[in-house]
Image (tube, rainbow, N blue to C red):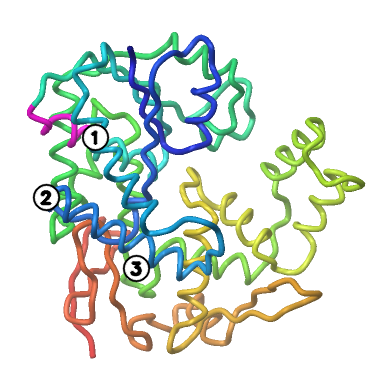
Amino acid sequence: MKLHITNGDYSGDMLNRSELIQGDVLCWKDLLHDGPVLALPYEAYSKARTTYLMSLLKSAEYSGEITEQMIAADFVARKNRLDNIEVYDEVVLWFEHDLYDQLQLLEICHRLLNLGLATPPLSIICIDRHPEVPYFYGLGNLTLEMMEELFNQRVPLSQRHLIVADTIWNFFTAPSPENLASVAQTEIVEWPFMAAALRRFCLEYPSIETGLTLTQTYLLLTLLRAPDELPALEYTLKQSELKGLLPEGVTATERYYEILSGPATFRRVFNHLQQLESAPFMGDLSVRSELNRLMNADLPYISKCLVNGEEVFSLTVAGAEALQGNKQWQADNPSDFWRGGVHLTSEAYWLWDEHLKQFNVSAYD
């Protein structure tokens, strides 16, 4: 029997529906690009991640049914599955090229390498495009038939792959980011998408020029100027219309121009952000949390109001000044957040210099 490990419920559900792809499915659900990711024993590690994920739900004003107990149980179930890895004759990894997935691959390889058990043969499907999908964001864009074709194209992973990934994971969970920055500038033969993903991760540190992450900068830019077009959104809406997934009486064209030309609602901001990213990796919760960080700060860079019952976002004067390079985020707003194993505070504020491709650490009042 095979164990299929993938990046979330959507692709996991497709694998479970397949009659061709047999075996158990484990969905590795964690957004490791934000919050503490610490080199701790598993119980302490999972507790820290659970606490962070609950804080993310709160900061994103989540109103769904996910509870702390459900998140903690997911970490326990993940460990139990790997602790019984010997019952499987193959482990198949299903992932994409973006930062979200590449960090999950690092953790999975770290866990497998350090199990203390003989692991079955490993194989991987990891793609950054598909010939039949014009705007490929991930496995969720594929049909079940496409997934089944990919299954037959999986390639083996060696012990060398695990060792390299484990080394990078140790850099990622370290309390200083310098080693991670160095490896991001090199070709990682074993993991062809990893260096680009790690370079994008470096840009999620505050910029030395503005104190803003690239995501925060992109969000401000979406509010400075509406996009001229959103081709990926247009394609997705037309596909949804063909499948009968849009609300009754709503056409793809109407919905597209409503989002493109209307007020800066969350839907427009989110889709514009997706277009600005070369490899989008943030979901709704992460984007909303970032918006709220910018909006609820001591000196807000974003404001919002209700228009016909819907939230509409706009730049504040400070946000516009930040885009002009006349503001430093940390000069007006205290910071206390994590990137992997690095804790960014006023006493140790790590800034990314994109021109020199290196980190600088400073303290501020």
| Number of numbered discs on residues | 3
User: Residue at coordinates 47% horizontally, 30% vertically from top-left?
Assistant: 12
Location of residue 191 (image quadrant): top left
In this rendering, is residue 320 above or below 94? below
Which one is nearer the viewer's eye here, 358 or 101?
101
Please, what secondary structure does the residue beneath circle 1 have?
helix
In the depicted structure, whether residue 214 falls above or below residue 232: below
Decide if residue 52 is on the left or right side of residue 325.
left
Q: Nearer the viewer, residue 66 or 33?
A: 66
Residue at 52% across, 19% down:
147
Please state which of the two labelled residues, at mark 2 or mark 3, is closer to the viewer.
2
Residue hosting label 1: 80
Residue bounds of the magenta highlight: 108-116
The secondary structure type at the circle numbered 3 is loop
Left or right, 314 with respect to 52, comes to: right
**Residue 47 lies in the magenta stretch:** no
What's the amino acid at mark 3?
Ser
Crowd tier of the residue under label 2, counting other residues whose Cα lies within 10 Å: few below 14, some 14–19, many 20 or above: few
Query: CA–CA distance between discs 2 and 1?
Result: 15 Å
Task: State the image coordinates of residue 31 (x, y, percent, origin top left).
Answer: 38, 50
Q: Amino acid at mark 1?
A: Asn
Image location (x, y in percent) of residue 190: 24, 25
Do residues under tags 3 and 1 come within 8 Å of each other at their CB atoms?
Answer: no
Q: For label 1, count other residues whose C-alpha is less than 10 Å away and answer few (under 14), some (14-19) or many (20+).
A: few
Task: Give the foreground label among 3 and 1.
Answer: 1
Report x, y in % for residue 82: 23, 30
Q: Which residue is mark 2?
A: 41
Q: Which residue is mark 3?
A: 207
